[in-house]
Each structure stands twice: as C-alpha cells, then as structure tokens.
Amino acid sequence: MKVSDFSAPAAAPTADESLAQAAGHVGAPEPLSVSEFLNSFNKSFKRFPFTIKGEVSEVNAKAGYRAVYFTLKDASASLSCLMWNERYQRMGAPLSVGMVIEVKGHLSVYASKGRMNFDVESYTLAGEGNLRLQVDQLARKLEAEGLMAPERKRPLPAYPLTIGVVTSPRGSAVHDVLRTLRRQFPLAKVLLAGVPVEGPQAPEWLVYGLQMAAYNGAEVIVFGRGGGSFEDLMPFNDERVARAVATCPVPVVTGIGHEPDTTISDMVADLRASTPTAAADAVVPDKGALEGSLTALGGRLSAAMGKSLALHRTQLQRYAFLPLFSEPKRLFDSEALTLDSLSDRLSRALPGALEHNRQQLEELAGRLARCAGSIAGRQRHSVDQAQAQMQGIAGHLTHRFHAEASLAAARLEDLSPLTILARGYSVTRAPDGSVVKSVAQTAPGESLAISVSDGTITATVTSAQPR
C-alpha cells in the first residue's frame, strides 16, 4: 500500500478525543452513539487521502447502480472499493479482473450496514496498464478521425514488382520476410529500409523508413517486427508512426509481433497480418495458386486456339470450292467476251481502213512528186546564183593575200638549207647527229657525215687543225 499527501501531526490527539471533537463534544469524552461514531469517522478520514496499488479481483458494474463496486487485493489482503458512476464514466477505461491499478481516495463507512469501503476518486493503470490506457485513448482519437474506417483500406497490387520492407536489419524477422518473398515471387525487387524498432528514437526512424520506401518506388510495403513485450511494441503505437502508415501513398501491410499482438499501426494499415512472415505472404501472389492459374489459362488458351483453327480450316475449305478459286478464269468471262467482240470488229474494220489509207498515201505521193520537181527547179536556180556570188566574193578576198603569200614563199625559199647547199655549201655532222661547228668537236679517226645538195658523204677525220 502506497500512501501519499499524508503526514501525522506532531501531537496527534487520541482517537476518542478526535471523534469527540468531530462530534462536537469538548472536554472529557462522553459515550457516542453508533451513528455519531460512524459520521465522525467519515468526517475524520475524509481529510486523509490515500493512494493504493493493487490487483482488481472483482468488479460489479450493474446497470442501474449508482456506483461501481470492486475489490483490490495483494498477496495477503483485500480491500472493498466503490466509485460513483459519474467519476467512473470520466475515466474512459473500464475495469476488468486482473488489472493492476493505482486508486486515489479515502476510507468511508456505510452507516446503515456498518460496512467500510474505500471511496475511489480516480484511478490509473499501473505499469503496462497505463501504457495500454494511453494506447486505447489514442486509438479512440484516430478512430474518431476516420483513419481506421474500412473504406480507407486500399487493395493490394496483384503482382507487385517492387516491394518495400521496413523493419529491423537484425533478427529473424527480416530473414523470414526476405526468404518468403524470394520463394513465393522471385520476380519482385525488394527495397529494404533497415531501421531501429525499439527505443526512444524508433518512431522517427520508422516514419523515415516508410517515406524512403515509398519515395524509391515501392508498390506495397511490408511494415513490422518480430515478437516482444507490450513495451517493446510501443513504437508502433506512436501517433507519428500511425499517421505515417495511414497517409502512406502506397498500401501498407503490417506484421507486428505475434497473433495476439495488435498495435495502432495494425489498425490504420491497409491490411494486418499476424506475423512478418504472414505479411510477406500477403503482398505477393501465392506461388501454387499462380501456377494453377497459369496452367488453367494455358488450357483455356489451347482450347480456344484449337476451336479457332478448326473454324478457320472449315472456312478455308468452303472458300476452296468456290468458283472464284477453283476456276479463277471465270472472273474474266465478261471481259473475254468483250475482247472477242472488239477483236472481231477490228479484224473486219482493219483491211478497209488500210486500203483507204493506202489510197490516200498514193494520192499524197503523186502530189508530192509533182510539187517536188517545181520546188527543186526553183531551189537549184537559187543555189547556182549563191554559188556564183560566193566565188566572186572569194576571188576578191584571196587576191589581196596572193602577193603577200608569194613574197613570203620567196623569203622562205632563200632561207631554206637546201637552197644554201645548192650554192656549194655543205653541213658536217658528228656521229651523234649534231652539226660540227668547230674542229674541237672532232677527233682523228672519227667518222663524219657531210650533207651536200644532192646527198651525203661519209668521211674519216685524219687530222684537225684550228685556224
């Protein structure tokens, strides 16, 4: 039993004196009636509040009662308690057997029955119970805001290719989740956000992990941890975490603790699974069911294709016997008849047309022959006149240049080497064909060629004497 806000006076009166004073008797104590004693007792102990901790062993909260009656106990004692309904309703957390609570109040005696009770003014859950009360109050608040409404729950993607996992990087939970995802749906890419799941900083890390998984493209998120005590799971009861789960842009599947454990994050999530492994199973298609579905679809597709092929085969066979394909030339029967008719008309019309054209051609040839003689005579006369004019003009033009050409020819004749040789001169050439201009170009015994006007003389040098 814990006592608070109470201290004994330095010189406390005896019980008889206190009760006598409470009853209004001053001086020597006088005997009190039972009513006076109990009334004085209630007045006296009302001034001394107590705080008592114990386990609830009985609860009587029947409808119509003005108070709730319950019993607190410990290992060796029990205490009857009552709490007026107005106070009880304000507490917001109903009592149940087994709860450990701390009550504040004072002792009182029900005068007509002589029964003593502890008049409870308020109570709080002790230890884990207080945490549960806080969680319950937060759950009521979020539920009132609609964050737990079924219509807010989003469907999970049937075949997610990117899955986010937000949990502790240590422990068996993360390995169970990864192993399950790899076994059931190996096509999926896993984004692991390893964050602390216990301790005072855990809520901030859990929120950050959710944000990062969604930001990096996760289509669905597995959010949870392995088992633990109620206190260990408290980060998942944090209001910040609950709101992050509720407002996450992609569906969130929770797997927190074990089957009996339920946190506020479970309540606001799109789907709650009993364990992290169950959460991993929930976000991916069942491998066996998927194989069965694919097999069934393959059978249906095969049957449909068989029916389609049979139908098309029948249609092709029917088309094959149509005249269009069996005798394709019949498509041109009408055109063939038209062609034959035109060919016949052409064969009849062509000889007459050719004869007519031949007669026209002969007539034109006769006219051309008659016209050609007259035209040729006129043209021949014109040509003769033009030729005479050109000869006259040419003679006049060449006469002026004839004297000049004769003078140039005479000069060329004078300068010609042959003319010089005809006068008695000669040209001597060395064996290499060069003209010998000096005795220095010759040597005794060398053969020289001497050109004169009527031929060439071959001579041998016997001596050469310069002048």
Image (tube, rainbow, N blue to C red):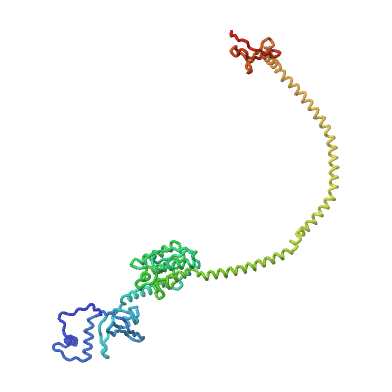
Q: How many marks?
A: 0
Q: Residue furthest top?
A: 467
Where does residue 369 sit, x and y in percent of width and height? 84, 35
Where does residue 169 sit, x and y in percent of width and height? 39, 65
Q: Is residue 146 visible?
A: no
Where does residue 417 sit, x and y in percent of width and height? 67, 14
Quadrant of the rendering where the C terminus is positioned: top right
From this view, report whether residue 412 is shown above or below residue 318. above
- Which residue occupies the foreground of this view, 338 or 156? 156
From this view, report whether residue 56 is shown above or below residue 270. below
- Which residue occupies the foreground of this view, 383 or 119? 119
In the picture, residue 130 is in which quadrant? bottom left
Quadrant of the rendering where the N terminus is positioned: bottom left
From this view, report whether residue 258 is shown above or below residue 16. above
In the picture, residue 381 is in which quadrant? top right
Relative to 177, 23 lies left or right: left
Q: Is residue 128 visible?
A: yes
Where does residue 36 sit, x and y in percent of width and height? 21, 89
Q: Residue at x 75, y 24 (%)?
A: 390
Relative to 311, 344 lies left or right: right
In the picture, residue 222 is in which quadrant? bottom left
Relative to 153, 297 lies left or right: right
Relative to 334, 283 lies left or right: left
- Which residue occupies the foreground of this view, 244 or 457? 457
Q: Residue furthest front?
A: 445
